[in-house]
Amino acid sequence: MMKQSIGILGGMGPLATADLFRKIVLLTDAARDNDHIRVYIDDNASIPDRTAAILSGGADPLPAMTDSLRKLEACGADCIIMPCNTAHYFLPRLQALTKIPFLSMLETTARTCAARFPGGTAAVLATKGTLSAGLYQAALEKEGVSFLLPNDAEQDALMRVIYDGVKAGKEPEDYRADMESVVEALTARGADYLILGCTELPLAAQALALNVPAVDPTEELAKAAIRFAGYGVKGS
């Protein structure tokens, strides 16, 4: 199979973009530098907030995302991935602007949930924008995956973890109570595992050393991109 390149439409946020690239490198079955994938990254941190656009009439992020798309097209990317779950709300509009295929973080995560936890119930941890738009709900229902959603207070806590914690560069102890309270509450309501459905949440879970079964959408997107590019996934 001919090897292909990956374009990362990033900056949403920068640390999540770095995490996706790191996972692509670590998960690629490679024995030397020359065995790795060519990856183009446009880390545009000026893209307006996606949740604000969805929920409260904030600035439309599509023009800035389109600018990044055009830059990745010019580089020669063969596929495009976005390390931001909420940004997938805009994916249909972006896909209509290009012939380069986007790989969906939501779809690959839902397929992983169905395969790894058959019959289990997922707790969807995500931004208010992602949850309000029903992004994971639609993807999980398509794969027949049972799920629970955080209530309003738990969504507030998750937003603090994401925005006031990880995005703000705070120490893990600053957001531990919020993260652990949400996980404990959803587990008590019957969740068997977590979907870390905001790209800051795998970073939070790692920093807090959470010992809970979970699916990391960033990791699943990295694996999907590696396979698309014609490379092997380490350990598969």
Image (cartoon, helix red, strand yellow):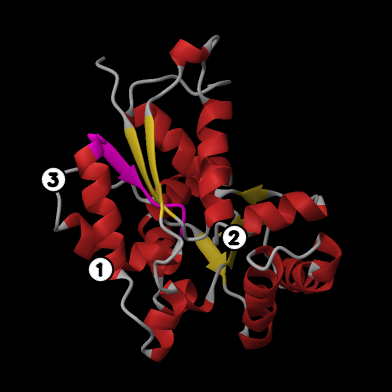
Answer left or right for 174 relative to 34.
Answer: right
The foreground one among 62 and 221 is: 62
Q: Is mark 1 on a helix, strand or loop?
A: helix
Looking at the rendering, the stretch of residues picked out in magenta corresponds to 75-84
Q: Is residue 17 visible?
A: yes
> Which residue in the structure is indicated by mark 2?
122
Mark 1: give few (<14), some (14-19) or many (20+) Cα within 10 Å. few
Q: What amino acid type is highlighted by mark number 2? A: Ala
In the figure, 164 relative to 91: above or below?
Answer: below
Residue at 60 percent of width and 57 percent of height: 196
Q: What amino acid type is highlighted by mark number 3? A: Lys
Q: Earlier in the sequence, mark 1 or mark 2?
A: 1
Q: What element carries label 3?
A: loop
Q: Which secondary structure is most common in the magenta stretch?
A: loop
Residue at 75 percent of width and 68 percent of height: 179
Residue at 28 percent of width and 39 percent of height: 79
> Which residue in the structure is indicated by mark 1?
63
